[in-house]
Amino acid sequence: MKEIKNMSRPKGSRVSGIGVYRPKRKVTNEEIAPLIDSSDKWIRERSGIIQRRYASVEETVAAMAIAACEEALKDSKISSTDIDLVILATATNPAQLPNLAMEIATKIGATKAGAYDIGAACSGFSYGLSIASQAVLSGECRNVLIVGSERMTDFVSEKDRGTAFLFADGAGAFVVSPSEKTEISAPTWGADGNLNDWICMTKDWPTYMNEKDGDFPALKMEGQKVFRWAITEMVGVAHKTLEKAGIGVDDLGAFVPHQANQRITDHIAKSLNLPPHVAIARDGVNMGNTTAATIPLALDTLRRNGEVKSGDLALLMGFGAGLAYSGQVIVVP
Ligand code: UT7
């Protein structure tokens, strides 16, 4: 039998660059509270959020993703023409099709790249990072861009008490490249479709179109149930991820969980018994929950503040709608 010989595979994969886009408009709790009969105090105490960013009309999912990708390419010093695949993780493409990754690839000049979108909501970035890593490890792609970009404000009702103060807009991207060493660990991922109605839309589009004067489909969430699931299940996921990477909590430089709620982060960090030298990402305090964009945004803040340095190990962990989760350990670029 003949075989294909022309395929070289790198020993490992790495994150070679990080880029983000934070929408210009900052929105305080005071601005949101009157619409949901809430207060700055309640929102801070229950979620840790002080402010978030809302995108303008011009700051579309694609526009924010393009800005994040361009910054990530600059950080990695890799040319856009050396990108072979662009993956967009998003839950907020305003149209059913086309996927937005093609527009992003074209506008950043990734003329040789394949491009597609993935879902998986709040786990989307971590899922996409694993796919990107596998594409590099297989030898099929030299460099891959994974970007999470969201306009949650398009799909959250400003009057919904359970979600309006949590969700927000933004984008973040990693460039994934070949390496001589393993710098992105195998993922721990999973999904429980039995719990899919804990975070879902109020209705689907055909139902909305058949109604005469219905409200648009918006996000709804069983907040308490999701909270309990996250603080119990994600601790085991974190341990398994560390085990797969062959490291312990003492080896970590940073813990970067999905920025759903600072109280969830506190619970998981406490259960993991993280030593004091591990920086814990708290970007959600100023950015809210940007679904597939929280992890790169949060790591960017830790890097900018000097809380992690190049070469440190970071445990990333996404979790949310599906319900789904995904985690991996990376070497910080
Ligand atoms: O990204 C996807 C993953 N998402 C998550 O992980 C989110 C997980 N869930 C959460 O973060 C939390 O459940 C919330 C922040 C959404 C809610 O916090 P909570 O501590 O679970 O509040 P609760 O729903 O148990 O409500 C507590 C009280 C209730 O009043 P009583 O019955 O104690 O008098 C609610 O009516 O707070 C009241 N309440 C509010 N008060 C002011 C509920 N929502 C609000 C509000 N403002 N927005």
Image (tube, rainbow, N blue to C red):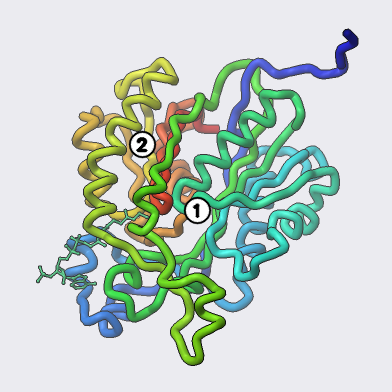
Secondary element at image label 2: strand
The reply to whether the residue tagged 2 has its Cβ within 8 angstroms of ligand 1 is: no
Q: Give the farthest residue toward the bottom.
A: 213
**Residue occupying the point 63% across, 57% down:** 65
Q: Earlier in the sequence, mark 1 or mark 2?
A: 2
**Residue 74 in view of the camera:** no
What amino acid type is highlighted by mark number 2?
A: Phe
At 37% from the left and 61% from the top, the residue drawn is 288
The residue depicted at 87 percent of the width and 16 percent of the height is 4
Give the image quarter of residue 58: bottom right
How far across and down, in percent of the image, does residue 174 sit? 59, 42
How many C-alpha atoms fall within 10 Å of the one at disc 1: few (<14), some, or many (≥20)? many
Q: Residue 293 shows which numbered tag?
A: 1
Q: Is residue 15 left or right of residue 254?
A: right
Can you say whether 269 is above or below 286 in the image?
A: above
| Amino acid type indicated by mark 1 | Ala
User: Image quadrant of ligand 1?
Assistant: bottom left
